[in-house]
Image (cartoon, rainbow, N blue to C red):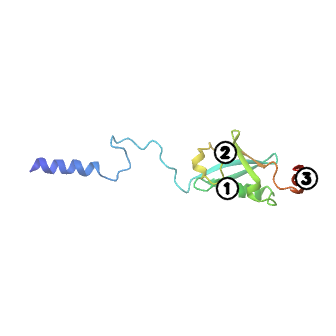
Amino acid sequence: MKENLHNESIRDDRHSTNPKHSDDKPHPHPKPPKDKEICLIFIVNGKPEKIEAKVNWHLKKAVEIALKESGNEGRPLSDWSVKWNNRVLDMEKKIEEFNFPECAELFLSLNAGQGGNTSMRRYADC
């Protein structure tokens, strides 16, 4: 009977909701707290805009703030792209997904070829 009780307690330990792995090591990639902030520096028209952003925000929220603070609110967000380490970033992703270092420099620029007169394209097809 004692052996059965001992086996039951071992089974209970294996099925616990403990966030550690079975070998009692901490999880290798813990998620940052949702209220954690990170410094991001957006370079807009050659000028830096320092933003304190929450890591659980979508990148587009921080971009909107940087554009507003830099006085670049005249164009829709879809006209802009953001780059880090020469990579265009998906603004729909959360900031924590990029693993930015503290005060990472992100470059905001207008997309080439946005808008303009489409009538010229029609004539080019003739």
Q: Quadrant of residue 76?
A: bottom right
| Mark 3 secondary-structure assignment | helix
Residue 67 position, x and y percent, is 76, 56
| Mark 1 secondary-structure assignment | helix
Decide which of tag 2 and tag 3 comes sooner along the chain: 2
Structural distance between the alpha carbons of marks 2 and 1:
17 Å
Structural distance between the alpha carbons of marks 3 and 1:
37 Å
Looking at the image, is mark 2 or mark 1 nearer the viewer? Answer: 1
Residue 4 position, x and y percent, is 13, 49
Check residue 123 in the rendering and tell me which mark sits there, or answer none.
3
Tell me the crowding category of disc 3: few under 14, some 14 to 19, or many 20 or more residues within 10 angstroms, Cα based. few
2 with respect to 72 (left or right): left
Check residue 103 in the rendering and tell me which mark sits there, or answer none.
2
Tell me the crowding category of disc 2: few under 14, some 14 to 19, or many 20 or more residues within 10 angstroms, Cα based. some
Residue labelled with disc 1: 60
Query: Which residue corresponds to the image point at 81% horizontal and 53% vertical from the top-left?
Result: 114
Say if 69 sits above or below 27 in the image: below
Looking at the image, is mark 2 or mark 3 nearer the viewer? Answer: 3
Amino acid type, residue under disc 2 in the picture: Cys
Amino acid type, residue under disc 1 in the picture: Lys
Q: Residue furthest left?
A: 1
Query: Which residue corresponds to the image point at 54% horizontal and 56% vertical from the top-left?
Result: 34
Query: Which residue corresponds to the image point at 67% horizontal and 45% vertical from the top-left?
Result: 103
Count the labels in the image.
3
